[in-house]
Image (spheres, grey):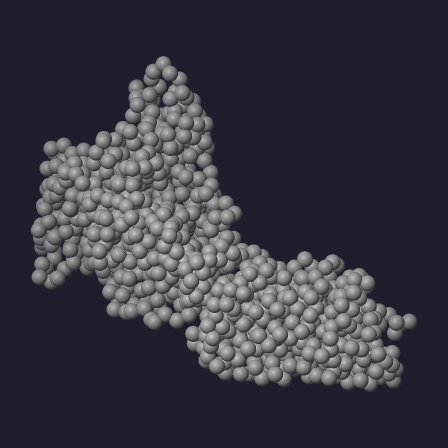
Amino acid sequence: MPAATIMFLDIVGFSKNPNSRQLELVDSLTTEVVSSLSTLINPQAGTPHVVAMPTGDGMALAFLHQPNQPWDISTIMSLICRVQQWAKSKDISLRTGIHSGEVDVITDINNKTNIVGDTINYSQRVMDAANPKQVLFSDVAFRQYIGSNNPSYSGPPYGPECKAVFEGAVEVQAKHGMRMLVYKMTLDPPQEWLSNEDPVVHQAMESTVTGKETAQQMPTDIRHPASIGTQRTPQTPQTLNPLYRRVFVGREPELKQLQSVFDSAISGEGGLAVVVGEPGIGKTSLCEQLQTYVTSRGGKTLVGHCYEKGSLSLPYLAFVEALRSYVLNRPPDDLRKEMGSGAGDVARIIPEVRDRLKVEPRQPGDPEEERYRLFQSVTDFLVNASAVQPLLIILEDLHDADKGTLELLIHVSRHLSGARLLIVGTYRDVEVDRTHPLSGSLAEMRRISNFTRVALRGLTADEVQRMLQNVVEQDIPWGLAELVYKRTEGNPLFVQEVIRYLTEEKLLIRAGGKVITTGSTPLEMSIPEGLRDVIGKRLSRLSQKCNQVLAFAAVIGREFALETLKAVAVMNEDVFVNALKESVQFSVLEERSQVGVVRYRFTHAFFRQTLYEEMIAPQRLKMHQQVARALETQYAKRLDEHAAELAEHFSQSTDPADLTKAIYYGEMAAKRATDVFAYGEAVRLLEQALGVQRVLDPDDKAKQCDLLLALGDALTVAGSPEQAMDVVLPEALSLAEAIGDSTRASKACSLAVAGLLYYAGTGINFQVGYPRAVRWVDKADRYAEPETPGRAWADLLWGGTKVSAGLIARDYTVLKDARRLVSQAFELARRLRDPATFWTMAYIQLQFLQAPQYTIERWRLAEEMALWPRNGVPVKTLGMALVWVGRILLESGQRKRAEEFYNEAKQLAERSGQGNLVLISLMIDSIIAMLDGRLEEAEEINRNITARGDELSLAEYARFSRNWTGPRCELLLGRATEFPEYYPEGGAFSALYLAQIGHDNEAKEVLKRNVLERPAAGDATPINNDIAYLEAALIIKYEDVIERLSTRLAENTPGHIAGGYGPCPQRILGASATFLGKYKEARDHYIESIKMSTIIKSRPEIALTRLQLAELLLEHYPAEKKEALEHLDFAIKEFREMKMQPSLERALRQKDILKA
């Protein structure tokens, strides 16, 4: 984006409505400027352009330059001197304001070049603060040209005897309540033509601030300075009278709150804020005031919008819109530095990056990991850009945001530490209930440390009165203000529309400097009932041609290109231009031009909604068809970028050819969304395409099936596997069977299995009592082809459902068959050499090798998995598999290596943000915390797992993740007072819980059923289950179970820790041997337990083992009392620090016995 130094010159005492004297002086001033610049600048030296902008009562000059490459200060100073001396010769006074910043150069509807942007607005504010004959520099311009360490300047045209001196910085309150820092320029020795007074402080009425000023879009002429002349071109349409100005009143606390957050961002404490309120409450206006403040602090604002259904739609559109202008206007070398190695990733969503930096997106790999790279690259880009200049990013209307935009927003917001970046989002709270996509995102935002919520409510009655006075520029009686306040409830947009309506209908008139009512009907009877009603009345006052143009605009969308509107609103050019001018004059539309294109936007969504809803259906359908065909022609070379718009407009038609195009473009847009990992947007587009297909040709089952398969896949990766498994994929399978297509049927089954794993967990765990798997197993088996990944998945599903059936019926023959099927799936995956299939089958195979007799086999498989390549493996599959490898390595006594695999899984979670891995990452944290003895922290992490699972719609998977450490943490802390609702009844841990809380008979029943009545031959019960059963049996002294399980465990290699997160098996065997009277054996087990627990640094297990060894020594080895006391004292200290209350009480009882 080009930068410019703006010099605003104002002839004191003149108005914006010129008379002949004023026109003569403005012409003379222009001539003086042209003459001066012609002598000061060498036309052959390639000097950047100067832009002259007449203002009616003076002029503004824009000295265009590149950012950080300002003009020669001598030129600026010389011109100041010459125009001030010219003013002296004409016996008039000039006020001069100078500011520097970035600007937009556009072409308006009159085909004239304009300069727009906050820099011009701010320059005018600097000038407004100047006295007659005074020159003020903004803080930004001063620092750029003079420098904070040298507040003076000597040189031409002042010479050695006279130098410019700057005083400041001085904080002034400019017009409309805006505060800024300025530097006053004086001369030493003083000169009569340059004022030395203090700057003007404008007293704004109760902080009343108007919105966009006329200076924001002034006619321009970009030529070499020597050829600048007086402009006589028509100006961009301005509002007819003050009724149509955008007025901002009050909100001082809210504005200060946002300003404070931005100030923190400048110092490196980046943050996220949301501005919340009903339609028309002033969210956008508040953000505009913040933009002005940001500019005054040397910052830059980028704005992006989210659009309602039917408008422009691209993945991550709000971010794309905010960043595109930055990308187009930043020098390529600077842009390359700021994007770094992530340029190719950012180019996926902002194609202009490819052209400017000559980069191409890398070949896509795993979608989840590529999605992370994209998010992180955008984040790094914004952080780097903010290091150059503080940034404010405003994302409007988040209630209309696509899921990808919300996910990217949360990702960026989590990485703002050290960034000079503030992101502000706006949304309508009345449209966001608990089922709205934004609701879950808001819960995520609240976890961000630098998060601020600013809620806007209606204005007070006093503020309404001030607003009315500011609109009509007259005193307003309190009674009238109170009446408007009661009807509008202080909604600023409603207030302004009411006063416009009453004034236009001449129900209010000015008389004697006051506003009075007219007519016999009480005024309260004349005020429209609602905002939509009063907006409808305003639109009715516009001309027929204006309403016709606006109707087409409403069909196109909230924002649109001028070229598009001209293509569909076919009418005489002059008529079209006048209609557009009228819509701008009456503040229905506003210009929002970008580099190379002129765009317009409805000033408020209500205008578009009202216009659109007023049209009858045939009129809307015809207009949608016209818009669709115009867009198709306009964007013929970039159809993929506008495919979503085209799909929306064509879908409104009844013409079969148009509906076919709607499906075509819908699939194109969905693919584009999937290519940039915006799966939520892909779901929306595929649902729309499916709906159109059912209208177009309900008998085309193959096409419907394809759309359903694509939708089911997108739903699963978008985080909605239940809908895919229960609704979409069953319908796809039914259609595939109806047309006899086994390939499509097999794909539906494979996608369903993937959804099962995504939603509920892995292997054994996702099968218990899980009916979805049963519904799919026959189908998957029927359609799977031999020696294919589909066959492996089908065998896996068969094995899983047999586990469920076998456990319910306690039929161990069925369980044995289940293990055979899973092993069969694993061996097939090995043969196929497909990494994705292998990693999935391998880590599920590990779960079927959890029995004590398979210890060596599972250790070997974990080592084999550690050597397999990761390329091409979905991050979710890889993450879960890595956790299982880490678990087995920990069991084998290799904590350091285990943590390496755990950390790799956590990095995958961080890189991808994938829901299952987020929960797995938390589960890993809880495992490490429990091993380290940070039990309360582990318990808090487990509670967080449950909460995050609900937010991510992964409640089942969260339960699976929490069960790894949650129940045992509660037992160790002594907080197991009742059976946990999140844990399945009838299993191993239920027996331990029941025994712990004193339900001995119930615990005994579980142990009898699950231990004594199970067959010994082929017993594949996992070791962590048997350890829990044995612990329960020890508590209730169930000797038969103790004998059976201790023998089973002692005959095998139990490892260092049960299941990778439970107790040390040697400790439990020591307790069993003690109970059975085998004291020497018990002592050996305890010594081995201390050794193994020390190797893996399991703090609770070391303390528990030393307590139990102390008890054994005190009771059965009295000669070794000293050693016993050492163990006991160590355990007591550890239990206190870890807050293991039951064990502490048990140890203290031993101390009491010794004292007695």
Rendered view: 864 above or below 79? below
- Relative to 298, is 605 above or below? above
Q: Residue at x 68, y 83 (%)?
A: 1053
Look at the picture and state if 1132 lies above or below 249: below
Between 81 and 801, the one nearer to me in the picture? 801
Residue 131 image offset from top left, x and y in percent: 26, 41
Is any part of residue 580 visible from this angle?
Answer: yes
Q: Residue at x 14, y 48 (%)?
A: 221
Which of the two residues, 97 or 1100, is positioned nearer the viewer here?
Answer: 1100
- Look at 67% across and 74% down and name the residue there: 813
Q: Quadrant of the N terminus?
A: bottom left
Image quadrant in which the C terminus is located = bottom right
Q: Residue 1033, how many percent across, how many down?
A: 79, 71
Query: Along the line of sight, which residue is nearer the eye, 874 or 769?
Result: 769
Q: Quadrant of residue 673?
A: bottom left
Residue 123 appears in view: no
Residue 126 in percent (x, y) is at 28, 46
The total of numbered circles placed on residues is 0
Closer-to-camera residue (762/42): 762
**Residue shown at 55% from the left, 61% from the top:** 775
**Left or right relative to 445: residue 985:** right
Residue furthest right as drawn: 1156
Location of residue 459 in the rendering, given as x and y in whole percent from the top left corner: 44, 34
